[in-house]
C-alpha cells in the first residue's frame, strides 16, 4: 500500500502545476476516467505484480483518452505504462485526491509504523526531491537492501545529487530499473560508475541537462530500454553497440541530429528509436 501511495504522490505532484492552470470543468471522458480509476483502485490486488501491472496499463490508456478529448498534449515525457497511475483531473480534484492519499499515509504510519521487515521487503522505492515530506530521502536509500526499482523525481530548480555515491550504493542492490527524471539543471552529467549497474534493464534520465553519456554505458548489456528525452545531449558513445538487448531508445527533444540518429540505428539495428 505504501509503495502505491508514493507512486501516486509522485504523479500528482508532477502534474500539479498543469492542473492548477485548468479552470474548465472536467469532460465526460475525464469523469469516466475518475470513476474507472476508483473502481480499479478498489478491485485490483496491488500485491499481485501482474494484476497491478495490467491495472496501471488500463489507467494509462484511460488518461490518454481523457486528454485526447480535452485537446491536451501530455507527451513531453515518454509514457511508461508500468509507472502510469491515476492522474490529476482538475485542480480541485487533484487537491482532494492528494489529501486523501496523505490521510491514508498518515493513518498507515500511525497503525503500522516502519519495521525492519518493511525495509527488507520493499522492492519499489520512490524518492520525491520536490516534495520530500511525507516520504523517503536519498539518505534513506541505505535502509533498502532489496530495492529493484528506484524512481527519483527531481525539482524545478534542480538539486545537486552526488551521483557517484548514489550509483555506488545501487551497485550493491538488485536494481533493474532506475529513473532519475525532471531534475532539470541539477543533473548535467552521469558518472562512469553507472556502468556498475549491470543488472539494469531500464534506465530513464529524461528531463535533465545531460550533454553526454560515459563510455561505461556499454557495460549495461542487460539494458532493454533507455530514455534520454528532454536533454541537450547530441551524441551517444560508440559503445552502445554492445547493448545487444536494447529494444527502446528515447531521444525526443534532444540535440541529436538526423545523421546522428542514423549512426545510432546502425549501432543498435534492432532497437526502436523514439523521437516524439
Image (cartoon, rainbow, N blue to C red):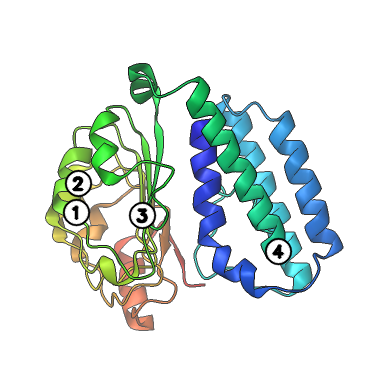
Q: The residue tagged with tag 1: helix, strand or loop?
A: helix
Ranked by sequence position, the earlier of labels 2 and 3 is 3
| The furthest residue to the front | 110
Please give the label number shown on residue 163: 1
Task: Determine crowd level at label 3: few under 14, some 14-19, many 20+ residues with C-alpha closer than 10 A.
Answer: many
Q: Pointer 4 and pointer 3: residues touching (CB < 8 Å)?
A: no
Task: Provide the residue designation for mark 3.
Answer: 129
Whole-number angstrom distance, CA of label 3 to CA of label 1 = 14 Å
Which of the 4 quarters of the picture holds residue 266? Answer: bottom left
Reading the chain from its start, which is encountered first: label 3 or label 1?
3
Residue at point 22% right, 57% down? Answer: 161
Q: Are marks 2 and 1 in contact (CB under 8 Å)?
A: yes
* Disc number lying in front (3 or 1): 3
Give left or right: position of 96 versus 185. Answer: right
* Helix, strand or loop for disc 4: loop
Report if residue 169 is visible in the image. yes
Q: Which residue is mark 4?
A: 90
Q: Are circles 4 and 2 on residues that touch, CB within 8 Å? A: no
CB atoms of marks 3 and 1 within 8 Å: no
Q: Earlier in the sequence, mark 4 or mark 1?
A: 4
* Distance CA(mark 4)–CA(mark 3): 24 Å
Amino acid at each position: 500500500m505504501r509503495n502505491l501511495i508514493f507512486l501516486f504522490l509522485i504523479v500528482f505532484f508532477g502534474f500539479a502545476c498543469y492542473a492548477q492552470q485548468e479552470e474548465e470543468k472536467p469532460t465526460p471522458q475525464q469523469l469516466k476516467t475518475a470513476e474507472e480509476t476508483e473502481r480499479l483502485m478498489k478491485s485490483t490486488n496491488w500485491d499481485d505484480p501482474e494484476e497491478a501491472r495490467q491495472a496501471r496499463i488500463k489507467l494509462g490508456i484511460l488518461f490518454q483518452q481523457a486528454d485526447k478529448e480535452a485537446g491536451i498534449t501530455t507527451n513531453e515525457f515518454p509514457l511508461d505504462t508500468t509507472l502510469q497511475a491515476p492522474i490529476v483531473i482538475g485542480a480541485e480534484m487533484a487537491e482532494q485526491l492528494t489529501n486523501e492519499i496523505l490521510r491514508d499515509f498518515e493513518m498507515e504510519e500511525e497503525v503500522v509504523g516502519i519495521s525492519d521487515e518493511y525495509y527488507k521487503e520493499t522492492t519499489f522505492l520512490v524518492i520525491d526531491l520536490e516534495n520530500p515530506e511525507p516520504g523517503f530521502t536519498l539518505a534513506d536509500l541505505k535502509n533498502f537492501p532489496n530495492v529493484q526499482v528506484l524512481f527519483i523525481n527531481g525539482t524545478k530548480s534542480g538539486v545537486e545529487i552526488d551521483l557517484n555515491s548514489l550509483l555506488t550504493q545501487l551497485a550493491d542492490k538488485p536494481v533493474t530499473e532506475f529513473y532519475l527524471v525532471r531534475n532539470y539543471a541539477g543533473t548535467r552529467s552521469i558518472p562512469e560508475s553507472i556502468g556498475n549497474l549491470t543488472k539494469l534493464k531500464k534506465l530513464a534520465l529524461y528531463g535533465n541537462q545531460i550533454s553526454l553519456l560515459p563510455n561505461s554505458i556499454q557495460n549495461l548489456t542487460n539494458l532493454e530500454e533507455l530514455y534520454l528525452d528532454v536533454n541537450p545531449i547530441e551524441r551517444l558513445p560508440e559503445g552502445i553497440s554492445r547493448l545487444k538487448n536494447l529494444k527502446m531508445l528515447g531521444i525526443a527533444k534532444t540535440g541529436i541530429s538526423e545523421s546522428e540518429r542514423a549512426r545510432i540505428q546502425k549501432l543498435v539495428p534492432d532497437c526502436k528509436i523514439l523521437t516524439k
